[in-house]
């Protein structure tokens, strides 16, 4: 540094430029020495700082302490936090990694810290019990509820699937409510039967096919279609 102060610069250089050059020359020297890097640390690839080696974490701004990895865990080399995670098949309980007890007819979740019942079984407390699927039904992927649905043409009632009685001139529908059957075009529902739609003069079946409407310009009146008043 003294040598730099004794250096002479061309008179034509501005004084400010000379100071900038001296600062640049000083800057090429390491901002730290080997003694400034704490134990179990290493210099960073950028700047003039340091970072803890794998398996260690910062203890404030003065040093690095070893990460204590408990049984059934592995180090994560994270800068903050615990610095470790439980191995697959274990879950964190009060600072320790406890094995997940997977009951019969179950499997570990994707995260590896819990379990789920296999298809066809429902979780009850700490066990998986089989879903009782009645005749004319099939398993569903719904976690809650009965776990099954009736086949097409059957309706769930009292834990069983009962055949839907479709009346003459009717057909099964995909409706999720009601009788689950509909009347064919030209017929209308009447109780549990399908009866013919009586279409009056100057009328036609509507878009549903189960009722009628007047031809234009006729209008509906007392069960029939009358001409509009002139």
Image: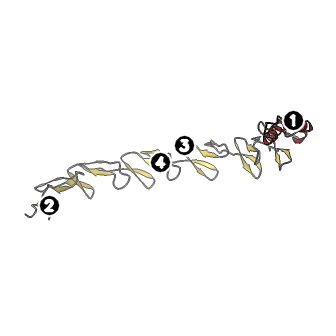
Question: Disc 2 or 3, which lies upstream in sequence?
Answer: 3
Badge number at residue 119? 3
Q: Please name which of the two marks, 2 or 4, marks the residue nearer to the observer.
A: 2
The N terminus lies in quadrant: top right
Q: Earlier in the sequence, mark 4 or mark 3?
A: 3
The 10 Å Cα crowd at callout 2, few under 14, some 14 to 19, many 20 or more, is some
| Label 4 sits on residue | 148
Q: CA distance from mark 3 to mark 1?
A: 86 Å
Identify the residue at image location x=35%, y=56%.
178
Q: What residue did someone put label 2 on?
A: 219
Q: Are marks 2 and 3 in contact (CB under 8 Å)?
A: no
Report helix, strand or loop for mark 2.
strand
Q: Quadrant of residue 177?
A: bottom left
Q: Nearer the viewer, mark 4 or mark 1?
A: 1
- Front one among 55 and 74: 55
Residue 160's disc is: none
* Rendered image quadrant of residue 39: top right
């Amino acid at each position: 540094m003294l040598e730099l102060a004794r250096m002479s610069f061309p008179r034509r250089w501005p004084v400010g430029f000379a100071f900038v050059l001296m600062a640049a020359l000083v800057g090429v020297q390491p901002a730290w020495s080997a003694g400034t890097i704490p134990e179990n640390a290493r210099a960073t690839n950028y700047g003039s700082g340091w970072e803890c080696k794998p398996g260690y974490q910062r203890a404030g701004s003065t040093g690095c302490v070893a990460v204590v990895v408990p049984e059934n865990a592995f180090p994560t080399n994270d800068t903050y936090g615990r610095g470790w995670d439980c191995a697959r098949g274990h879950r964190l309980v009060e600072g320790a990694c406890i094995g997940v007890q997977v009951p019969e007819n179950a499997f570990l979740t994707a995260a590896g810290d819990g379990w789920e019942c296999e298809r066809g079984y429902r979780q009850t407390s700490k066990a998986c019990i089989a879903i009782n699927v009645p005749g004319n039904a099939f398993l569903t992927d719904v976690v809650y509820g009965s776990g099954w649905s009736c086949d097409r043409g059957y309706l769930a009632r009292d834990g069983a699937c009962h055949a839907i009685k479709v009346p003459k001139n009717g057909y099964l529908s995909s409706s999720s409510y009601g009788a689950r059957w509909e009347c064919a075009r030209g017929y209308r529902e009447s109780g549990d039967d399908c009866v013919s739609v009586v279409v009056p003069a100057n009328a036609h079946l509507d878009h549903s096919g189960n009722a009628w409407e007047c031809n234009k310009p006729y209008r509906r009146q007392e069960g029939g279609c009358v001409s509009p008043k002139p």
